[in-house]
Image (spheres, coloured by chain):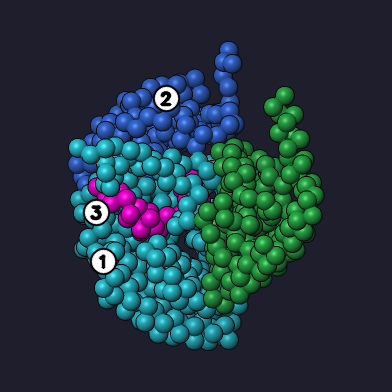
Amino acid sequence: MGKRSVIPYGPQHPVLPEPIHLDLVLEDEKIVDVLPSIGFIHRGLEKLTEKRDFNQMVYVTERVCGICSFGHGYGYCDTVEHIMNIEVPDRAKFLRTIWFELSRLHSHLLWAGLMADAFGFENLFYQCWRVREKVLDVIELTTGGRVIFSVNKVGGVLKDITPEMQKAILEMLDYVEKETKVLEKTFMNDYTVQSRMKGVGVLTKEQAHALGCAGPFARASGIATDMRMRGYAAYGELDMEPIISNDGDCYGRCEVRIGEIYQSIDLIRQAIDKLPDGELAAVVKGNPNGEYFMRIEQPRGEADYYIKGNGTPNLDRMRVRTPTFANLAGLCEVLKGADYADVGILAVTIDPCISCTER
Amino acid sequence: MYKITRSPWVMHYDGSSCNGCDIEVLACLTPVYDAERFGIINTGDPLQADILLITGGINTQNAPVVKQLYDQMADPKVVVAVGVCACTGGVFKDCYNILGGADQVIPVDVYVPGCAARPQAIIDGIVKGIGVFQERLEKMEKGESLTDNKKAEETAESEDK
Amino acid sequence: MTATEGKNEIIAIEPGELSVKAMEMKSKGLRLSQACAAWLRKEEKLELSYSFVDDETYDMFNVRISLDNDKRDTEIASISDIFPYAAFYENEMRELFGANIKVINLDLHNKLYRIEEETPFVPKKEGQN
């Protein structure tokens, strides 16, 4: 048995911009145990329901996380709409789907860049972020915001996507698809990149299920679960299959996320093709009274929303269970037995969003 | 020493932000906005950093972390608060675990508003920060003490007593 | 694609039945999706919800324990032996809402978020300090 030592990781760390603290117990170069401690970003925004009414909470919920901001706003609105039995117009459903997929597109490209940065491929990092800026340009064109776009409200959406904007989106998709094919070659075929990812942090299907993993992290281990298959928003009318990989290592997770970039491009094209005419929002009357559990697929995985209303404008409880919270147990498991040098890659590989986790 | 303002090194710390400003800070450093054309380099090491970019509000747990990072930076140093949360607490001001903006624990020189702050605004903030940095540098070379630090020393002394 | 929305049921149980129910869910191959507590201000009730989901059929079963104000200290056995990752959720429920969950396998002693504000966020009972 080698010498045991404890190395702290974070909260300020060059690889991960977000603060999470891990106590890594090392035996020589191998990690034998991990103790995560969270709470650096805990704000307690779930308790703001006591001070803000349910319409104002949309904007608070969007700021659970700046990367999957649209998804959180959508999840909240959809849950309240279920409680209040509001029938959202079809056009609003399709518009939400388009924006949801645009945010997934920018989130996955962002992850790809951070991953490249984690294994020290600075050029690839810059290339990924250069392509991502095109997606942000389109988001800015359609909503006015770059990362937090606040177009959701209870009952529908606030803005419309005009035919000119649709044209701009389609042009952007062609560009991103072309560029992603180039990036994919490096991620999937490059020898040095493969040597950092193949066989690193393997999580089997059984382990992933036993640890309750969600999203691309679980799909890379062969669990074919994707909440979009539940058909919320307009996903029920679009054609898609969950993308899975059976490797269960970092390479598999990369493969799944790059596959999902193409999938998002395909879904946006389908949604623009089928975009119906009609109203943007339904009329909202009264206050929510009741409860509902909702699950949606965020870029990082499955997110749960639970809302309990009591007939007053202030909700009794608003709870968001975010994908990284579910994947934390999986992260601790893949870190055990890994080399110390791989900690950065493994931490990025679950696509962590700490501000989601702690809210 | 004279030309240090041509290449200030920035360090980014995420207080309790929602990530929106963090990715905009990173977007600043990547192509399209490319703040590196001003010689700015992103570093993870507080000992080598000249400018501290802080995003998000301060809560009870990260207050000592922020304080420590600031203390580890060598003089002269500049703090830029990016985003409305780092300025005042923003949308989370009423949350039970938020103490307020970054100026609750460290002196802030430049405030960049916005939720999320746009890259143009962040670059503007950094450039303003370089101006403050230049002033402090000149003061230090003349042998004058930096007022902020003097204040900090006084408070530290009074705390010791 | 065939959209399968899946069931979304709420199953009310007594506090003592939780372990049995969790075992039943585990044997069916379900996954613990989330667990949360809620304090109902109007009715003065503490509610604990454990959600179990099926990854293939997208069904969701929410097991609900409802505790009146005078019974909210009722001991609840942790399910972290059955679902190890439940520990995070249970620590959160105990820290923020004062649910009396016993024997969590990774017991953080109300220090998950390390907040300074006084917790739990439920109104104090008479005679409590």
**Looking at the image, which is closer to me, C122 or A196?**
A196
In-image side of C47 versus C17 (left or right): right
The residue positioned 44% from the left and 81% from the top of the image is A176
Instruction: Please state which amino acid type lies under the numbered disc 1.
Output: Ser
Residue at mark 3 shares a chain with residue at mark 2: no
Which type of secondary structure does the marked residue at label 2 adopt?
A: loop
**Looking at the image, which is closer to me, A226 or A42?**
A42
Above or below, comparing residue A273 to residue A68 in the picture: below
Q: Nearer the viewer, mark 3 or mark 2?
A: 3
Residue A306, magenta (yes or no) = no
Which type of secondary structure does the marked residue at label 3 adopt?
A: loop
Residue B161 coordinates in the image, percent (x, y): 72, 24
Q: Chain of mark 1?
A: A
Q: Chain of mark 3?
A: A
Residue at mark 2 shares a chain with residue at mark 1: no
Report which colour depicts chain A: cyan
**Mark carried by residue A84:** none
Which type of secondary structure does the marked residue at label 1 adopt?
A: helix
The residue positioned 62% from the left and 47% from the top of the image is B70
Residue A344, magenta (yes or no) = yes
Q: Quadrant of residue A194?
A: bottom left
The residue positioned 67% from the left and 47% from the top of the image is B102
- Which residue carries the number 3 mark? A203
| Circle 3/circle 2 CB separation < 8 Å | no
Crowding at mark 1 (Cα within 10 Å: few <14, some 14-19, many 20+): few
Find the magenta span and give its range. Answer: A335-358
